[in-house]
Amino acid sequence: MPYLQISLSPKLDDATKTALIREAGKLIELIPGKSESVLMVRLDDDADVRFRGICEKCAYVSVSLYKPSSFEAKQAFAKAFTESLGQLAGIEPSNVFLTYTEFPNWAANGNLM
């Protein structure tokens, strides 16, 4: 189950939130073995996120994955999702930061994998 935590400074309307989450679901499939059907997203819009010490449109995205994925797959997701944030939330790509954490174990339904 991939988990995305998206913190962004702009406030989004409900339609834009829904579109961003749907886009995340589509793009997570750029990472082999990941799919929208098991994707969990936390979206914190209108967050007090600052870049360069000032208020400007910016975003931080934390991606948690079960097991390692290839650099190329993670790069493809990072590029595509950064572009989507630009289109949907009006954030310049240079103001989007994304990190990955990969776990060797993950529990779902009380079962450790």
Image: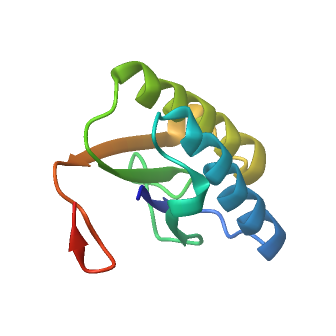
What colouring does the structure picture have? rainbow
Residue 11 placement, left or right of 97:
right
Nearest the eye: 17 or 11:
17
Q: Residue at x 23, y 73 (%)?
A: 111
Determine the residue located farthest toward the top in the rendered image.
72
In x, y percent, where is residue 34? 48, 45
Query: Left of 21 or right of it: where is 110?
Result: left
Residue lying furthest bottom = 110
Depth check, front residue: 30 or 24: 30
Q: Which residue is drawn at 41% across and 59% down?
A: 1
Q: How many marks?
A: 0
Instruction: Give percent across and percent down for residue 64.
Output: 33, 53
| Residue 113: image location, x then y, percent | 22, 60
Q: In the rendered image of this protein, does residue 66 appear above or below residue 29?
A: below
Residue 8 visible, this orientation = no
Q: Can I make out residue 61 in this image?
A: yes
Q: Which residue is drawn at 78% across and 75% down?
A: 14
Left or right of 49 on screen, residue 26: right
Q: Is residue 109 left or right of residue 107?
A: right
- Residue depicted at x 79% and y 73%: 13
Residue 79 lies, in percent from the top left, at 56, 28
